[in-house]
Image: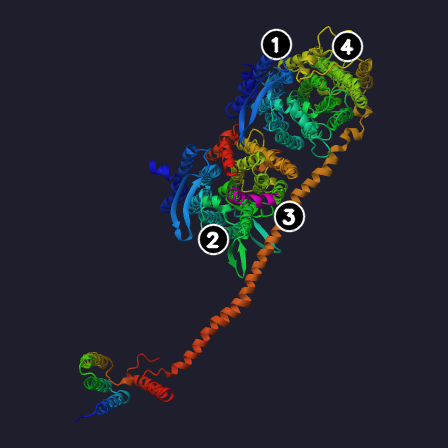
Amino acid sequence: MEFLGSHLLTFILFFPVLAALVVLCLPKDNLKTIRWTAFGASLVPFTLTVILWMRFKSGQPGFQFQEQYTWYAALHSTFHLGVDGLSLIMVLLTTLLTPLALLASFNITDRIKAYFILFLFLETGMLGVFMALDLLIFFVFWEIGLVPMYFLINQWGSEKGEREIWKGIKVQSRNYASLKFIIYTMAGSLGLLLGIQLLGVLFNTYDLQTLYTNWAALDPNDAMLHFFSRVLTVSTVKSIAFWAFVIAFAIKVPVWPFHTWLPDAHTEAPTAGSMILAGVLLKLGAYGFLRLVLPLYPAESARYAGWLAFLAVMAIVFGAFAAFGQKDFKRLVAYSSVNHMGFVVLGIAAAARASGTLNATIALDGAVLQMFNHGLTAAGMFFLVGVLYERTHTRNLDDFGGLFPLVPIYGGILIFTSMASLGLPGLNGFVSEFLVVRGSWPVLTVYTAVGMVGLLFTGAYILKGIKSVLHGPLNEHWAHGEHKLTEINLREIIVMAPLMMLILVIGIYPSWIMDVINKAMMLLFP
Amino acid sequence: MEKFIIWLLPLPPLLSFFVILLFTNKRKALSHGIAVGAAGLSWLGSMIIFIRALGVEEFGKHFFGASINWLPTGSTWLKIGVQIDPLSAAVVFFVAWTVLAIFVYSIGYHNFGQPIGDHDVAGLPPHGATLAEHGHKHIVPSIEPMYSRFFAFISLFAFGMYTLVVSDNLLTLFVGWEIMGLCSYLLIGFWFGKPSARNAAVKAFMTTRIGDVFMLLGIAFVYSFTGSLSFSEIFKPEMLQALASTPAFFGLSAAGIIGLLLFIGTVGKSAQWPLHVWLPDAMEGPTPVSAMIHAATMVSAGVYLVIRMFPLISAGWTEGMPLNTTMSLIAFIGAFTALFAATIAVAQNDIKRVLAYSTISQLGFMIAAVGIGAYVAASFHLITHAFFKALLFLGSGSVIHGMEHGILYTGDHTDSQDMFNMGGLRKKMPITFWTFLIGGFALSGFPVLTAGFWSKDEIFAEAFGNGHLTVFVVLAMAAFLTAFYTMRQITLTFFGEPRTKAAEHASETPWTMTVPLIVLAVFAVGYGWVGIPENFPGLGGLIPNWFHEFVGGTLSKLPKAVVFSWVPLVTSLCVALGGLLFGWLVYRKVKSPKQDFLQIPVLKNKWYFDEIYNFIFIKPAFWIAERFTSLYMDQTVIDGILHSVARFSLFLGHAFRNYFDKPVINELLGDGTGNVVKASGSSLRKIQVGRIQYYMVASLAVLVIFALLYYFLLV
Amino acid sequence: MSIPLSWYLILAAALFSIGLFGVLSRKNAIAILLGVELMLNAVNINLVAFWRYLDPAKMAGQVFAIIVFAVAAAEVAVGLALIISVYRRRKTVVADEIDLMKW
């Protein structure tokens, strides 16, 4: 126990890999064993995270549960893990959503061994990003997260559908989406790597804590690097790294106009893949902003906050409009992610502009809570779309209609989750959106006001979804015979239950989680 | 003790909602038992609070309240809490009564105790069940398929309203506000199988949401300005002073902007022009829902908000001063809506739609009253209106129910809500008739007896007494129209002879429906007597003007009673009686819509607002959503750029391969080196003869040559 | 008194040239081997002669000569064995006909 206690993060981080190795050795025809092993194994990191949560001291500055091992001494890079309130929230979200996503994948029969192994690797990748205190490690895990997701989309994505990319040239949608996803993110992480390397050369270390403390120590006009015949000063190097970071994270969030990979990837991914993609992977970008950009570059962030807010508002408004315009239910939900992540970015922008004030803290509180909330609701929404798709093999909203009497329990759950996504007060989405609006209104008044158009249309697309699926005259096709729509089953309800519980609990009594977030934000951005 | 009860006040309906949905969904009697029991508990709590409040001296200063820390924000906390002050005590009183009445009424309305319908499905109104009795079959009303769910939803609705009323802060108020929005959506779309109901539900939610997002901004503004959301903090004199003196945008003060933003919320929720369009469509819901929305909860919430926010709206204004911009705007919107909605109401044939427009119109009265600073009059009218409008809606539901009974009996398909299909119902449905008459007279402001007279008269008196003549005249015209269309409705429905077979066979509704009507009728008459002005000729002073004293005490400064004048009183009498008389005279002879001279297209079509909005807002929104954003912006422009980059990379790769890699690297450098080596190899191989002696001669020759070279050149 | 060093050297050179001629001109592998032996012994004469005339105090010349004997003996042993082995397989000891490595 003692050993476990002092290496908690390592255990959480690498347990999925161990589990993946175990799964690798299982006989491939025994679907049940593979499923239950993977699912059971993914519960272990969650349990450990709960222990982590309990032992975490929220008022304490700095990182906790730190572990540091030699890794690449020649580069001054160490394997350094640690969590503060911000990463703790994200770790909790990841370890919570992964078991649910695995449970949601129980209906998959095609090459499930590979599927579950990839999923477990994915979990390690995501957790690593949130726990890393060393930039090089951060980058390594950042990339590790990409690869499994690529294969999940590419191999287990929806089989139907083509996308016309150029006049007359068509490719299979899931190939298109997975390629777009990985190329786009790779393009971003290229800059990320560059930025990290530059900082590593500049400070002779990749350790985040050291960077935090030594950041201002260098003379900005010192010549640091020789680039052909020119000399780069410290400040130039820093600003190159700034832009590299911003672009990498903006692609990952995604910020308008870098968002177009998202609807494609989300729509084509398998249900559980979409859950994780929307639930956790999008948070990596926002996490990067909060972990690297804002703390290291307060001045630059403040200078460009207006632009960031502009892009955020574009994401909010256009995301909502685009979601409203979709005929494909899953695409609708995918665009809703653009819309919701826009609020996260708006909060970040406001905090960047007003850094150090109460408004900034509130905006950040809202942004981080919105990250968590969106993780819950988006995962839930994608899962519910998946449930429907699995039974009907269509996602076209026009094909449904009046399904409520056939599937009352599903309908109730869908309405509940939709309302959380809509931001209904009393459920979680409202708390975070309210805080973001409250935090950004005094700082970025006009942007916030324009963003309200997006909030209005959030209602429109959510209601459109409910209206087309559940309400209206019954589409008789689903009422009888072989197409008869069956009610959501127990396993699926069990997937939704924890999400719904959290949605309700955070909506009514948010202070248990807000306490951690708020203290973390106050410590991180004093 | 009081605080404890106030905290618990909204909870029974919430529990009822969850219990019914999760556990008793299949058991109808248990479900309505739980729902009515919960409403009863809340009612009991409200009454205890109300009576206790009456016993407190200067209740406005010593109100009940408590708060807790809810959300950490930086080093401060966002507090939420409950409070019952005079205004909310008065509101909670009517909410408790109307909610309970509507709950009980719903049991009868949804045909509890009747058999399950032959072809009924969830999502459509019940169609009736065939019953074999004494050898012959006949059709009787059937029970609502989603009976339990209905009670769950209205329980949640009641929870929303109670939460809103007991809130001591804007945040929980907004929570209750939005939960009611959700419930209105769920309940207007209760019969979601009907496309019209489905669309009406979405329309209601979206239209009110327009108001809500502005309101959210207002809340964010006031929160960031004052650092608190609780009323007592915001309404501190120095805080109001600061709000009124800080300029914001558009030349308005911060208080003005916040007031406006919050008021837009009210415009949506209370269906004021220009966001009034959802309310008439909301009639698609079951009638108890209409009563719930129109009287007990939703629209009242909007008015409650402006009354609650009156100190903020009127910050910097004192009685007798000219109205500030925000107040003028509120007064304008209110007065305009009052008249505008009344003009539409006169041309409607659907019994519920007439009432819907009359609600909009009456809410306009209240809003206008707040706008001219008469918030006590507004709250008085809010309460009396809640009683008589709940009564009218439940009455109309009873009429429809009776008509449906007749329709099932005769089997022909007449519209059970069209007033021209009715007539002569006073003999068939006496209790409904008398209670509806009381409600209608209260709505018209029938002098002295009815509650509506006293509250409306107070608004007239305030408008006239404070010199807001335009408002006064407009409201008077609206009041005349109100009396007129009310009498039109009563005449067409109850008087004369039955105009259809269904009307002939209509029958009185069960006690669960009539008892609530009677209870509400008592309030529709009696509640007016608690607010008779002191200086009213003859009656003034017989009963103390309790309402003015009590609710007026909400704010630190009691508004002074307006000086009595005959002009508003006479006007009020004239318009009410004149309208009623005129309506009766015109419509007692009318038998069909053709004889009705008010069937003017522009009025029947509600001044074409739906069409205009459709053209200006909805169609462009659809275009932006379906074409512009995802298709043009994302898939064409942004993805186009991406694809161009991809194409360019592809082209670059292609070019590199075909014009550099292949010719230069592969052919020139790669193959070229190979070729040179090969050629030189094949030419050099000739000296590889394989004879050792040959090699040795060659090496000897080389040795000799080098030796000679060495000798001659170097030595 | 005596015979000068150059005589020895001329003798050795002559012997070496004879050996070389034998190696280059003969086709019989055994004869070639013999030629090599002659060349080796020419070297031995040189070694011994230089030792005697230039630096008799040291033993290096003699030692080298003995090493050359050893090498020559080994060479003959291995060489003859190879030739016998080749002869057994191919029934010839003519160098031209042993052309397995030729392209």
Residue A87, label in figure: none
In the image, what residue occupies the spot 46% across and 73% down? B673
Asked if both marks, 3 and 1, belong to the same chain, the answer given is yes
Task: Give the label, 2 or 1, closer to the camera.
Answer: 2
Q: Nearer the viewer, residue A134 or C73?
A: A134
B446 to the left or right of B693: right
The Cα–Cα distance between marks 1 and 4, rounded to whole angstroms, is: 27 Å
Residue B536, label in figure: 4
Disc 1, SS: loop
Asked if both marks, 4 and 3, belong to the same chain, the answer given is yes
Q: Residues within 10 Å of mark 4 (few under 14, many from 20)?
A: some
Disc 2, SS: helix
Which residue in the structure is indicated by mark 1? Answer: B55
What amino acid is at disc 2?
Val
In which chain is the residue bearing label 3?
B
Task: Give the label, 4 or 3, closer to the camera.
Answer: 4
The Cα–Cα distance between marks 2 and 3, rounded to whole angstroms, is: 41 Å
Q: Do residues under tags 1 and 4 come within 8 Å of each other at their CB atoms? A: no
The image position of residue B520, as x and y in percent, is 67, 14
Q: Quadrant of the N terminus of chain A?
A: top left
B697 to the left or right of A82: left
Residue A201, label in figure: 2
The Cα–Cα distance between marks 3 and 1, rounded to whole angstroms, is: 65 Å
Magenta: main secondary structure? helix
Q: Is residue A290 magenta?
A: yes
Asked if both marks, 2 and 1, belong to the same chain, the answer given is no
